[in-house]
Image (tube, coloured by chain):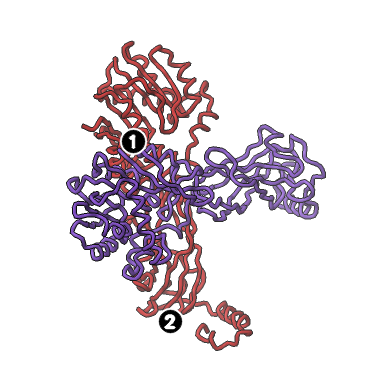
Amino acid sequence: MNALKDTAAWRFARGIKRAVVPPRSADPMPAEACRGGVIAVSPPVALEVASVHSWIFQVMNQGGLAWPSDGPNPVQLHGQWQTYRGTAYGEPFILPLPKPVFPGEPQEFALPVATPPFVGDFVLNVTLHQLNGGPFTSRCAETKSVNVAVPVLGRRAADIDYHEVYRTADLNQNHWWVVGAYHSKEQYEASKADRRGMLVKCGLTPESRVLDVGCGTGQMADALKDYLSETGAYYGTDIGKEAIEFCQQNFQRKNFTFRPGEMTRIPFANDDGPFDLAIYFSVFTHTFVDESALLLAETKRLLGPKGCIVADIIVSDLIERCAGNRGEMIVNQEHFLRLAGTLGFESEIIGRWPWNSQAERLMMVFRL
Amino acid sequence: MASLGGFVPSPLKPLAKKVRSAIRSIDKASLDAPLSEVDARAAIRLGNPSIVVEKASETVSPVRITNHGHAVWSSAGNCPLFVTFHWLTARKAPLDVPVQKVSLPVAIYPGEMVDLEVSLTVPDSLGHFLVEIGFTQDNGPSFGDVTGKPLYLEVQITGRNVDDIDYHKAYATADLTQDYWTVVGPSTKAEFDRVGQGKLQTLIENGLTPDSRVLDIGCGTGQLAVPLETYLSDNGCFYGTDIGIEAIPFCQAHYKRPNFKFLQNEMTVVPIYDMTFDIITFFSVFTHTFPDETVLLLAEAKRLLAPNGVIIGDVFTSPMVERCSGNRGAMELNPEHFHRLVKLAGLSTQMIGEWPWQKYGKRQVFRYTHSK
């Protein structure tokens, strides 16, 4: 009988029979028919936020009955995104089986699954169900479901090559646009006082020595150029060479210095310090946490004993350590603060704004 | 035919397209002469490729090609044209991976655009790479994008998903009463014991005495506890910690000397607060943690290290990696980046051992001491 089953003729006849009379179950199947499992074949190592990925699931039927894909009680895959802490994220969703699955004949299905619309460390959980019968795992202990941990990253198209941005921008026409948050030159000008006011709250005086890392086209230099006295000083650095040239031409006070830096190095000697205030506006929102830690270590070298760092970060509970790309980096708040703590920094939150429905932007002060 | 497109009244365009494709199906376009300079003009655009790919896999890269020359391009004939994919390091040095030549699936007529889904073979090395995309013609020119700027696809290669480790699951599914060596790596008990003896030797060379206080972070099923059980005196002590909750009762049941203690740690927190140690070991820990986690673990070790104490820990380094690449199965770090991060934790390093790891990497063992 088994030898007969291996022949092409048998399989042909079986195929016709299955096409004409596909399996149906009038009632939910008995528990012993729910033995089997689902595994993910070559699951993705990372996914882009809000994308749709075609996952490949292998479904194995190790029970005695064919699993119908149609009819009143079809067998289905149920998907559920979870956070890295194991809590459900979003609504569960149904992935219908495109074809019935027969005992002893594992089948691979490519099924599209929508990736969560937020960056984070997620787990996709997929289980077998029968409509009106419930989850297989609760009915048959040996049935296997699948959990795939997959980091959800920012879109590649939203990633930033900062050097490219500066090379292609016309800084004389729109130096406010290249640094991001402003819609118009008017808005850029109006917010100058706000930016300065926040620093005054952190101890800025006209005599302060200020270090501005990621100075861009000088949004802080502009706010400070008429504020700092001759005894104060401003040192700006940026990885964008063009930004530094722009600043050198536009802010020509004797005590204003601009120099190009590297991703995790500040191009000023210890003798240029100590600084009273170090500014990181929209820097740690674009660097990986280990890079942020190296930048904080560089700043520690240049900071006076009573000095402080003002920096913004984006935090989300969906993230175990950090997730995103240079376009937008989101961190786990506790993880970030522990890294800062390793360097001896104590932190204080001085402002917070919603970033999206899952994340907040925090303005932080770090003190030694 | 393409140049006539503008003269065909719009209701007839679908018909014209059909006629055109019928003609093209009969007239098999082929390239039999080298392309001249004006015909070797292409616009290459990237679609939306994968953001991170697995090593030694195939990845589909969408590429859009426009023929800005006057000749038909084809991969048939005496001088066929191919799209080339050339793997480079992040610093644009060539990689010893053969250039991948891909045939055009259809002829590309002047002024027309074709979207290709190219299956790229990913090298078997972790890291950050560039793939330069261009054209090469047999017996003809090689050329790139018409702008003259080389077109690069950025690719980060990480470990294979199936090689990733869920450490908790590894312990939860292992039967430690039958086999306690496979879960920490060695395939036999003899190998487990031999590696344990090697670790003991390394520690003796780095100042271990029978009276030492030893902390073994990531102790697993006790590969180091075995040799130290006979080596340490009653004045010394051994603390083992591991994130695997099953490993702890196993060790407690097997290594019962009163000065041997075992407790669970979190990924980056070691819950010991009232004592310091002469020797702290991280064997095969940083080879599985992300660099920011490694910093936090080293900071914990520094907190627990006696003034003249020594930390021993191994790491995979590779010049192909910009910062870090890999997963919990194997993590590779850029060597310079790693050293700056160690310094950040307030420690100095000295290398005490080095072996080749994969094609470009090294497994390096360091001793770390308080920075002076």
Q: Residue at x 39, y 66 (%)?
A: A186
Q: Residue at x 27, y 34 (%)?
A: B347
Residue A44 vertical position relative to residue B281 in the rendered view, above or below = below
Which residue corresponds to mark 1? A342
Viewer-nearest residue: A304 or B288: A304
Is B368 on the left-hand or right-hand side of B81?
A: left
Q: Chain of mark 1?
A: A
The answer to whether one can see residue A293 in this image is yes
Nearest the eye: B111 or A79? A79
Residue B38 occupies quadrant:
bottom left
Task: Report which quarter residue A33 is drawn in.
Answer: top right
Number of other residues with Cα within 10 Å of mark 1, as a class: few under 14, some 14 to 19, many 20 or more: some
Give chain A's shade: purple
- For discs 2 and 1, the disc positioned in front in the rendered view: 1
Q: Is residue A61 left or right of residue B261?
A: right
Where residue B151 appears, as percent x and y from the top left, is 38, 65
Chain B shade in the render:
red
The residue type indicated by label 1 comes to Thr
* Mark 2, residue position: B70
Instruction: For mark 1, give the secondary structure.
Output: helix
Indicate left or right for A102 with B105 as reference. Answer: right
Figure quadrant of the C terminus of chain B: top left
User: Which label is found at residue A365?
Assistant: none
Give the residue at the far right of this rendering: A26
Q: Is residue A163 above or below residue A136?
A: below
Indicate the chain on which mark 2 is placed: B
Whole-percent x and y of residue A356? 51, 52
Q: Is residue B125 visible?
A: no
Give the image location of residue B192, x and y in percent: 41, 25
- Choose between B346 and B290: the one closer to the eye: B346
